[in-house]
Amino acid sequence: MTHASNKVTRRRLLEGAAEIALVARFSRAAAGLRPNIVLCMGDDHGWYETGYNGHPYVKTPVLDEMASQGLRFDRFYSAAPLCSPTRASIMTGRHPNRCGTFSANWSIRPEEITIAHILRRAGYACGHFGKWHLGPVKADSPTNPGAMGFNEWLSHDNFFEIDPPLSRNGGPPERLKGESSEVIVREAIRFMEKARQKGQPFLAVIWFGSPHAPYVGLEQDLALYKNAPAELRARFAEITAMDRAIGQLRTYLKKAGLRENTLLWYCGDNGVPQEGRLDMPLRGHKGQLYEGGLRVPGILEWPAVISRPRATQVNTVTSDMLPTICDLLGLALPRRPLDGISLKPLLDGTMTVRPQPVCFWAYDVRHERKSNPEPYIRRELQEGTTPTATLMNGRYTRTFENYRHPRIRPEDFRGDAAILDNRYKLLVVGEPPATELYDVREDPGEKVNLIAREPALAKRMEQQLRDWQRSVLTSLTGADYASD
């Protein structure tokens, strides 16, 4: 045996021993106390807009530290390129089209089973703080956070800025003074402390209103961006303020003795909006199925299990959150089609590639309104109460929609769609639809369309995508609820 082969053999033995030790540590932690779960999400916070991903201006010291200490997902995707749908995917582990949450201001359906339903039944205190955007947060809404499993909530129907107007447990909006990210973290900490004093594990979902437009920054944060483009200074200031609030959360967890066994997961809800692209190396932006519309920051901290920093290139998506948490806690999954998978093997070091593709579908909402006009929820129950900073249809509040879809028709397959395997991404986009194929590992900017070079691969992937869409449409008819 040569010296080189001896070195390879020793390295493999060491790697194998390290993997065995990691799995053993993971198993010991999983067998101990149930972890607290904190899910944080930025609003319109794209992959590029962090210091650790090389942004030329944005300062995110807390997220940078988390990325250097925990598990960094370098290929983390939002289930959709828009906010409400991605939020539905986190709550349910399903693609949002399965329950008709097609776009912004489209509600979830009351029959959906959420991560809060599941953890509350398992003895967790469940609280939601910040942007909900899955229906109104008022008391009589059938899709408010309480109806969807949370014990308590301080939430907004949509986005919010400094001094945010928020509804506490469905009551009339009350205006809370302060920078919005710090306000909701402060309220979330109160909830966590109450659960800690009771000796109860908690699920805290903290969905920030930042950095969604219109952009409003504090002077102390704006001062950091004097050299940035003037139109983006306030946006970047919002990101830094959100980052600081996450730091306040982590400080509390440490001082309260909770950090070691708290799983803290941060991500964005969709890619960067068009005005924030700058020189981003990814193609596209919010609202599009190219990488720039779907790739978001993703970081998971859980010191009891992830004791050394790691980064992964495995494709992961917001729909994976519910299956992962259920697997970690040994809880049964809902008996209906899920689109996410458990990332437990990724946490314990045994997953190196994703076992199934990720599919995306921006449904044609105009077609839905025209073809299926019967509301799923009465209109008055879909009218929001918490005001935003901008008008829509002459109102500062938002009205949600969702429609009954009793049968599947050929024209229901319309709308941009994509399927992503471990190397290639196939898109069906435009009207009439055009098919595009990219090697996103070698070509993250999606510049070279391989459709003419790889016709067999494209055909196979397109069929996979079509079969998945048919499954989604079956769920959309309500078939999943009949089996409950």
Image: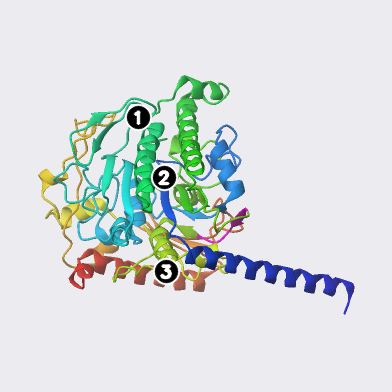
Q: Which residue is mark 1?
A: 161
Q: Amino acid at mark 2?
A: Met
CA–CA distance in space, label 1 to label 3: 42 Å
Q: Is residue 40 visible?
A: yes
Which residue is disc 3 drawn over?
462
At mark 2, the secondary structure is: strand
The disc labelled 1 sits on which kind of residue?
A: Glu
Query: If you read the primary sequence from the N terminus, does the residue marked by circle 2 or circle 3 appear first?
Result: 2
339 relative to 386, above or below = below
Is residue 419 one of those drawn in magenta? no
Identify which residue, 161 or 443, lies in the foreground: 161
Mark 3: amino acid:
Glu
Q: Residue at x 35, y 37 (%)?
A: 187
> Taking 122 as reference, is 471 above or below it?
below
What's the mark number on residue 41? 2
The part of the chain drawn in magenta is 309-315
Task: Give the CA separation, mark 2 to mark 3.
Answer: 31 Å
Quadrant of the drawing holding the N terminus: bottom right
Q: Quadrant of residue 328?
A: bottom left
**Percent x, y for residue 162?**
36, 26
The label on residue 420 is: none
Whether label 2 touches label 3, CB < 8 Å: no
Between disc 2 and disc 3, the foreground one is 2
Q: Residues within 10 Å of mark 3 (few under 14, many from 20)?
A: some
Kindly report the distance in space between the C-alpha atoms of the residues bearing marks 1 and 2: 15 Å
The disc, 1 or 2, on the residue closer to the chain's N-terminal end is 2
Q: Can residue 208 be seen from the camera position used here?
A: no
Q: Residues within 10 Å of mark 2 (few under 14, many from 20)?
A: many
Colouring mode (rainbow / by chain / secondary structure / one colour): rainbow
